[in-house]
Structure formats: C-alpha cells, structure tokens
Image: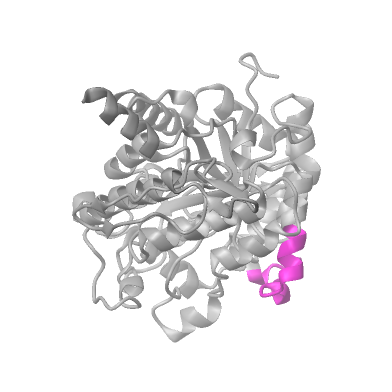
Amino acid sequence: MTQNNREMKLGAFFMIPGHHVAAWRHPKAESHQTMSFDFIKRLAQTAERGKFDMVFLADNYAVRGKNQKVLSQTVNTLFEPFTLLSALAAVTDHIGFVGTVSTTFNEPFNVARRFASLDHLSGGRAGWNVVTSSTDVEAQNFNLEQQLLHEKRYERAEEFVDVVTKLWDSWEDDALIIDKETAQFADTSKIHAINHKGEWFSVAGPLNISRPIQGHPVVIQAGSSEAGKELAARTAEVIFTAWQTLEEAKAFYADVKGRMAKYGRSPEELKIMPGIFPVIGRTEEEAEANKILLEDLIPEEAGLSLLSGMISVDLSGYPVDGPLPDLPEVSQINGGKSRFQLLKDLADREGLTIRQLYQRIAGARGHREIKGTPKQIADQMQEWFENGAADGFNIMPPYLPGGLEDFVNLVIPVLQQRRLFRKEYTGKTLRENLGLKRPVNTLIESEKETIKSR
C-alpha cells in the first residue's frame, strides 16, 4: 500500500445512459436500454467486479429543459432511487448503494424509514446522499412557485438530518427479542420516542422499523458552499465534491477536515471523494478522438440549457461564441452557489466562450475531466490521493456501458498494481469497506449523560 497504508475509495456514479449530456447519442451507448433493469443490473455487477465501494445514484424532481427542443434532446428519465437500489441490492453481494434524497421536498420520518429498510434488505449496504433542491422548476412540482432561499434550505437540511439520525437510533440494537415462549417480540424499554420539536419539524417517533444494520446508513453530502461545508463537517461521512485543480481540491480538503474538531470529530471520520470524468483511450490519440467525438455530439440548445441551469443564469440571448455576460455576485445566486463560482472561475481563468464552457462541462458538469491512457488516468488520481486532495473518487463514465467497462478493465488494474486500491472486499457493509466506524446510539448516550448530571 501507500506510505500510510491508505487505499482509495471509489464510487461508480450512475447517470443512465452516461454522464455526458450527449451520451445517449454515442454510437456505443446502449441508449435503448435506458429503462431496462437488466441493463442497470449488468452495470452494477460490473462495478462490483471492479471492487467499487458503492454505486451512487443522482436524482432530482423535475425534467431539464425550458423549451420543447431542449426537452426533446435531453435524457429526462430517472428511476426513483429506493425502487431501483432495492432491486439492485438483490442481485449483488458486496457493493454499497447510495441514493440521493432531497431534504427540501421530503419528510424525515419517511426518509429514515426507507433508508433503514434498504439497509436491512441489502445487509448493511445503504447510504444517503443528502442534498437540498435548488431550482424553481422542482419547487413548482411541490405546491410552490419558487425555491426556498439558500440559507433556509440548509437550515432545514441540518434539522432534517438530526431528526433522521434520532429516528434510526429510536430502537436500540438489541431491542428485538422474538421469544415465542414468553410472547415477547421486542423489549419496549429499548424503543424510544424522540419527541423532536424544532423550527422545521415536529416528530414524535419512534421509527416503525428496527435500527439499521450499520447503525446509521452512511451519510453523504455534496455541497461545497460555506453552509454546505459546515453541514458536512458536522454530519457527513463522505463528501462528493467538484474541483478543477489540485490546489483548489487541497484547500477544500484541508478546510472541511479542519472544521471537524469543533464537532468532536476526527478527520478520519470523513472521506472526501471528488468527482472525475475519465475519457480513456489505449493511446493518447485514441483518448483525444474519444473526447472530440463527445463534443461533436452536443446539440447546441441542450448544451446551452445545461450551462444556464448550472449557473442559474439564462444564457439563451447571448452569442454562443462570445464570452459569458457579466454575472451576478455569488451572494445573489439562489441556486447552487459553489458550482456557479467554480464555472465562473473556470471561464475567467481560461478565457472560454459560452460554447467552449458548455463543451467543457457537458460531461463532467463542473467536476474534473481526466483524459488519457489508463496509466495517465491512474497517475492523476494518484497525485490527488497522495497530496492531500482526496480520499478517493466518484467515477463518472461518459457513456454506458463502455465508459464503465473501460475503467474497470483498464484503469483499476493499474491502481491495484500500485497498491492504491483493493483487490477484494474486506468488509461486509458499506461502512466497513469505507473504513468508517459504526456510530453509537446517540439517544442512549444522551440519556446516560442526563442521568449522570442529575
């Protein structure tokens, strides 16, 4: 292994039929299989063959594209995460399953119950990617005209996560007795109401399912704004983040891990996993050709719509081969603040036109694109991993299944040869494979502290 006996953690980020906005047009993409469970099952089994820690499933609550042409050019079919991940758990043995579920348009009791169910059904392989919804079109599907303000979304999210973890802890690990002779199914002294009353939620509890196998399903967070970093330092166990340069990634890594001590947490309790979009070729020339092919497939309207959505500014009235217009300050953005700033900085740093910028982000969507041979891909991953920028990576295949198969067949063997990544699973649960401790029951610890103080 490396000097500190560390191994990378890897997530397989599934966006069907690929991360590139034009993935469905790629000649080797199995786009006709987008709604096929057999196809997605094959992808999950490929990721498990590659010894990935987890499958990561993104989600949102609205179609993308403000006009009919963009809607016609863009993949807008998304499986509901719990339904799909429950099915995939039944056809795999080791790999974890992370579902994106928003705190903005859900209730803590439902989310706690669903993830506890997935954790039990999968044998302890569930994870929750905590997000806040950021677009007005999503709000309009939930009885609202506009999205909540950014600060309010994160205030709600903090309390939401607190309530969910209390609910997971509302049953002690040994609450189930199941004694037929004494007619006692459960020990009621080990089942606890949470009686939460806060600014956003009032929840009595307890949950109507026993404590998850992992104690808590792994809690994952993706925000990189100030509010997002603070929430992650206090509650997250994995962060999926987006950075373009080693210097930016190192600064973020040090910043978030440096905030954890004030919450009584050590840096090892959080794994930071930037997203990377690998464009792989057996030669440099083949990798470049693969990149050009993807760029050539982007419909202009779809690329423009994607970029507009990501920076929360409508660019449709500006020359596509001209520069970005003067953009508002990040404080005025009510969408994703960190992604807005990242893309603005990228355009300014490299002097990109609107077209060049949407070509750059049409696959990685603000995450880092790595192009090259398997060795070159591994070199760049190793550089970030060994220089305080990452504990692992969330892999974003350009198209499917080929983009995932190339990474598993070509890049992972290089990482394994360098002793940077596992050859076999060592744990039974997602938490164990990530090297994360099983959490203590917070409700019980709180009760003990109350008794001591009397």
Looking at the picture, how far across and down is residue 404, in whole percent?
72, 53
Residue 321 sits above or below residue 32 on the image: above
> Which residue is pictured at 54% across the width and 47% down the height?
212
Which quadrant, please, contains the C terminus?
Answer: top left
Which quadrant, please, contains the N terminus?
Answer: top right
In magenta, the rendered stretch is 24-43
Tell me, yes or no, whether the highlighted magenta stretch contains residue 25: yes
Q: How is the image coloured?
A: one colour
Asked if residue 282 shows in the view, the reply is no
- Furthest residue in direction bottom, as rendered: 68
Report the side of 438 relative to 161 (left or right): right
Residue 92 sits above or below residue 224 on the image: below
- Furthest residue in direction top, as rendered: 3
- Along the line of sight, the residue nearer the viewer: 93 or 297: 93
> Which residue is pictured at 63% across the width and 62% down the height?
86
- Along the line of sight, the residue nearer the viewer: 46 or 67: 46
- Along the line of sight, the residue nearer the viewer: 404 or 78: 78
Q: How many discs appear?
A: 0
Chief secondary structure of the magenta span?
A: helix
Looking at the picture, how far across and down is residue 177, in whole percent?
58, 46
Asked if residue 223 shows in the view, the reply is yes
Looking at the picture, how far across and down is residue 53, in whole percent?
65, 42
Tell me, yes or no, whether the highlighted magenta stretch contains residue 326: no
> Which residue is pictured at 49% across the width and 25% down the height?
268
The answer to which image quadrant residue 28 occupies is bottom right
- Along the line of sight, the residue nearer the viewer: 361 or 448: 448
Residue 160 sits above or below residue 25 on the image: above
